């Protein structure tokens, strides 16, 4: 049985405003999808709908051939993981405890989970967080906290990973590291990855497929070469964006607005 | 990460301290009783006056104090998770205000202890139902509206309700005849003399702990936010309703038994978080045991130190507890 995540003529609206009229996409294992679009275009809403955290406003979302609304939350949590844009911790807890909390769906109801630290330690190692394991999450910097949250998602060990702005507040090295780990999870371990991002070039380098939303109902989905083109980007972002060739890869450059010389 | 074995060890050590404090509370009395004579009365079946004092006054009072303390600490810890706010305590949602209005109304009508307790229970229940009805969108919503992470409705409704009840209580105190005033003030500061059902708080405490500890992993997730919790398989509406009911029941029983004992519900969970970490599975039983220790100690001091005058237990607790907590707070890890 394949664990494809499928959107069928999916419609999204927020407070009476239509964000997406009809989106069809099929995310298969091994694929990495980036979601692009201007502010408030519905990127986060799309991700939350794909995660089954809100109902679709039209059409449907299927995971492994079953409507995502038909899953019990705990079943769903064993198959797909979701990284919210922000996690605000009101209380102190250690990095290890935060990361270990993602083992909840995999543990039996009565289990304490103390012997199940393998995935957590592996994720901490992957994201260079071992030295912070005993630190209080509320004392970490924004970027460190984001890495903890990504490590938490990896600890959940699921087939489908949905990440809402995983790169926010990360430095350049950790942006590349995170994207590397996401593409590796897809290509080596057969996971399916969908993430939202603002940097078109980073996204283009680290994706097989793309979704482009314009926030007015229009949505393009497909192979990245078909979706991420300078014409589509210019239309979606209402800003002239030119494609240039850098070596043999395309590079997208937003035009400077008039009258603002550096 | 705290392992189950180390959690068991911690609880065992705390429980041993708790039993020691209970024993101490039973053995210590006013100037006219010695520890030796109290011990004699405790272990021998002889039908003496001291035997009656120990078994019919001190033991029920100590047990009730322990139960009340545990209930308030557990309830405070649950409320803090429920509204995701470290400042929450068992009284945040207006339960104590409702109980106070009920109890003081009964006292004003000249009712005895039993009716006063029933008045407190009815008031607490009324406050609890009001909060639940007004905040049901917050508590029961299956899908959260976008970008609404915090339980602001719930805490605002609770705080408003508490202010409303506070106003009614002030009016009652002003209107009350002088002979009732002392009893009313004592009730509001926490009063453990004349406890009717000494074992009820301990039994409810046990039931609450057995009910919430299996939810511990889900509470750990909920504490970090509803969106990430529901992505990890928690049903926030179900768990929040469950802890709301458990916390309300715990507070109602505590308030009905001893009046509004402040401080313990806010400070014990925070102090223990600093000492044992923030894993709710470890913390909740620790709160149950630790809260009992604190209130039993404070109650013993309150009845021994100025004998024959009894001090209000809530005030004693705050006088000792505030500097202790400040010390814990300043001495940051």
Image (cartoon, rainbow, N blue to C red):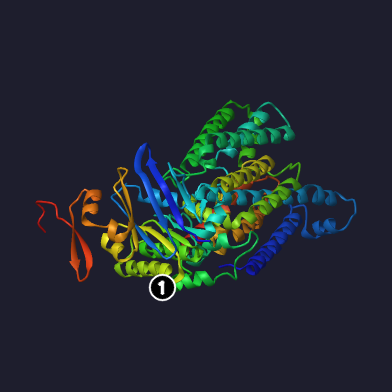
Visible in this render: residue B316? yes
Residue for point 29% across, 56% down: A227
In front here: B110 or A74? Answer: A74
Left or right, residue B34 beside residue A253: right
- Residue B323 visible at all: no
Q: Dividing the image into 4 quarters, which one contains the C terminus of chain A? A: bottom left
Dot 1 falls on a residue whose secondary structure is: loop
* Along the viewing direction, whichever of A44 and B4 lies nearer the viewer: A44
What subunit carries mark 1? A
Q: Position of residue A161 (x, y in %)?
A: 44, 60
- Image coordinates for residue B286, horizontal then vertical, percent: 63, 59
Seen in the picture, residue A187 relative to A214 is either above or below; the reply is below
In the image, is B149 to the left or to the right of A78?
A: left
How many residues crowd mark 1 within 10 Å: few (<14), some (14–19), many (20+)? some
Residue drawn at x 55%, y 57% as measured from the top left: B220
- Residue A24 in percent (x, y) is at 39, 50
Is B279 or A26 nearer to us in this picture? A26
B2 lies above or below A196 = below
Q: Is residue A191 placed above or below B163 in the rendered structure?
A: below
Residue B263 % position (x, y) = 57, 49
Q: Which residue is mark 1?
A: A128
Q: Residue at x 76, y 41 (%)?
A: B196
């Amino acid at each position: 049985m394949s664990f494809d995540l499928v959107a069928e003529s999916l419609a999204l609206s927020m407070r009476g405003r239509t964000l997406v009229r009809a989106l069809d996409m099929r995310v298969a294992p091994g694929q990495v999808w980036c979601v692009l679009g201007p502010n408030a275009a519905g990127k986060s809403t799309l991700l939350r709908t794909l995660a089954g955290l809100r109902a679709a406003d039209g059409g449907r979302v299927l995971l492994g051939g079953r409507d995502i609304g038909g899953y019990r939350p705990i079943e769903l949590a064993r198959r797909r993981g979701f990284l919210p844009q922000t996690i605000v911790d009101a209380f102190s807890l250690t990095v290890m405890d935060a990361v270990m909390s993602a083992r909840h769906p995999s543990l039996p109801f009565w289990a304490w989970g103390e012997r199940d630290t393998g995935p957590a330690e592996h994720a901490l190692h992957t994201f260079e967080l071992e030295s912070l394991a005993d630190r209080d999450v509320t004392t970490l910097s924004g970027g460190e906290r984001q890495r903890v949250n990504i490590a938490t998602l990896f600890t959940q060990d699921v087939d489908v990973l949905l990440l809402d702005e995983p790169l926010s507040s990360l430095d350049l090295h950790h942006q590349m590291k995170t994207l590397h780990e996401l593409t590796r999870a897809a290509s080596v371990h057969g996971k399916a990855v969908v993430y939202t991002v603002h940097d078109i070039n980073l996204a283009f380098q680290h994706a097989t497929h793309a979704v482009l939303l314009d926030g007015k109902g229009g949505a393009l989905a497909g192979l990245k070469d078909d979706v991420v083109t300078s014409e589509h980007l210019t239309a979606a972002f209402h800003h002239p964006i030119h494609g240039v060739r850098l070596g043999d890869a395309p590079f997208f450059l937003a035009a400077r607005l008039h009258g603002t010389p550096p | 990460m705290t392992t189950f074995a180390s959690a068991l060890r911690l609880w065992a050590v705390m429980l041993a301290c708790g039993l020691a404090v209970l024993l101490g509370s039973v053995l210590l009395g006013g100037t006219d009783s010695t520890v030796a004579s109290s011990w004699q009365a405790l272990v021998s079946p002889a039908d003496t006056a001291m035997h009656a004092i120990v078994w019919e006054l001190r033991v029920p009072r100590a047990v009730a104090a322990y139960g009340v303390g545990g209930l308030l600490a557990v309830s405070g810890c649950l409320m803090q998770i429920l509204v995701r706010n470290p400042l929450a305590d068992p009284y945040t949602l207006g339960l104590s205000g409702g109980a106070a209005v009920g109890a003081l109304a009964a006292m004003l009508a000249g009712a005895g202890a039993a009716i006063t307790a029933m008045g407190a229970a009815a008031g607490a229940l009324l406050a609890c139902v009001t909060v639940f009805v007004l905040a049901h969108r917050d508590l029961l919503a299956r899908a959260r509206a976008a970008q609404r992470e915090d339980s602001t409705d719930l805490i605002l409704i609770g705080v408003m309700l508490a202010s409303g009840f506070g106003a009614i209580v002030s009016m009652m105190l002003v209107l009350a005849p002088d002979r009732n005033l002392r009893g009313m003030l004592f009730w509001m500061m926490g009063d453990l003399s004349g406890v009717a059902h000494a074992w009820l708080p301990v039994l409810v405490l046990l039931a609450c702990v057995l009910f919430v500890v299996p939810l511990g992993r889900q509470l750990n997730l909920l504490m970090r936010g509803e969106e990430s919790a529901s992505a990890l398989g928690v049903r926030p509406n179900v768990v929040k309703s469950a802890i709301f009911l458990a916390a309300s029941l715990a507070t109602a029983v505590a308030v009905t038994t001893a009046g509004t004992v402040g401080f313990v519900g806010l400070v014990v969970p925070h102090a223990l978080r600093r000492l044992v970490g923030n894993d709710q599975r470890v913390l909740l039983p620790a709160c149950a045991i630790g809260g009992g220790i604190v209130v039993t100690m404070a109650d013993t001091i309150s009845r021994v130190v100025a004998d024959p005058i009894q001090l209000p237990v809530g005030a004693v607790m705050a006088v000792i507890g505030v500097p202790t907590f400040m010390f814990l707070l300043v001495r940051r890890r």
